Image (cartoon, grey):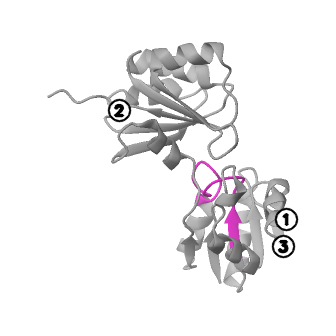
Amino acid sequence: MKLYVVPTPIGNLEDMTFRAVRVLREADIILAEDTRKTLILLKHYSIQAHLESYHKFNEHKNTERIVERISEGKTVALVSDAGTPGISDPGFLLVRNCIEKGIEVECLPGATALIPAIVDSGLPCDRFCFEGFLPQKKGRQKKLAQLVEEERTMIFYESPYRTLKCLEQFADFFGNDRKVSVSRELSKIHEETITGTLSEVIAHFKTTEPKGEIVVVVEGRKVKN
């Protein structure tokens, strides 16, 4: 009995690992954030398995039942739509409950958008903080105010529809001259990374509409000597 946390490609299906394919083939149950999207991946690799839905709207209701099934001897693999489950995706609650019940949890290494984004940015990546999606409304201003003094490189996920507004808010809090990098569609055909100061990147996206999955990497506050 075991829970496997299995990363899946963030875009390019070739980024699936041999081990991830094997684990999914051997699992008794595969928990998927969106079964329709996961079916595309499974068909691509000729994987046949029992698929169940597990997402943010049903994880609280289903977690205990899933833990019981693992305790009964089932091997369960958890995947999200893209990347590593638990990183801005469902997974934390299930992992925590398994650990509390003494169930072994193994997370496979694999795809996640934040690492290629920070490496592509050219900003310091020896130390960084991952903020994921900022609160859309309540608590957003407070969170940004807290990050003003952050000296590490910061990584954010954002919707393409809110990217420009997000960058403008960053400029308000961090200053127009703060360096930023915006990566979109990582690993896909239209992959692109735009770098510059916040004012420069804002000007770019005022004339070029951002599209696709977005990762924003922001320079930390410079330490005065």
Which dot marks residue 72? none
Name the chief secondary structure element in magenta: loop
Is label 2 in contact with label 1 (beta carbons under 8 Å)? no
Quadrant location, the C terminus: top left
Amino acid type, residue under disc 3 in the picture: His
Pick the residue in front: 107 or 72.
107
Most foreground residue, 127 or 34: 127
Can you give x and y, in whole percent of width and height, for residue 214 in the image? 61, 35
Give how far apart the Cα atoms at labels 3 and 2 are.
Answer: 45 Å
Q: Which residue is under mark 2?
A: 220
- The image quarter in which residue 219 lies: top left
Label 1 Cα neighbours within 10 Å, binned few <14 / some 14-19 / many ≥20: few
Mark 2 residue type:
Gly
Where does the magenta region start and end?
76-92
Residue located beneath label 3 in the image: 50
At x 34% / y 34%, what residue is drawn?
Answer: 150
Disc marking residue 43: 1
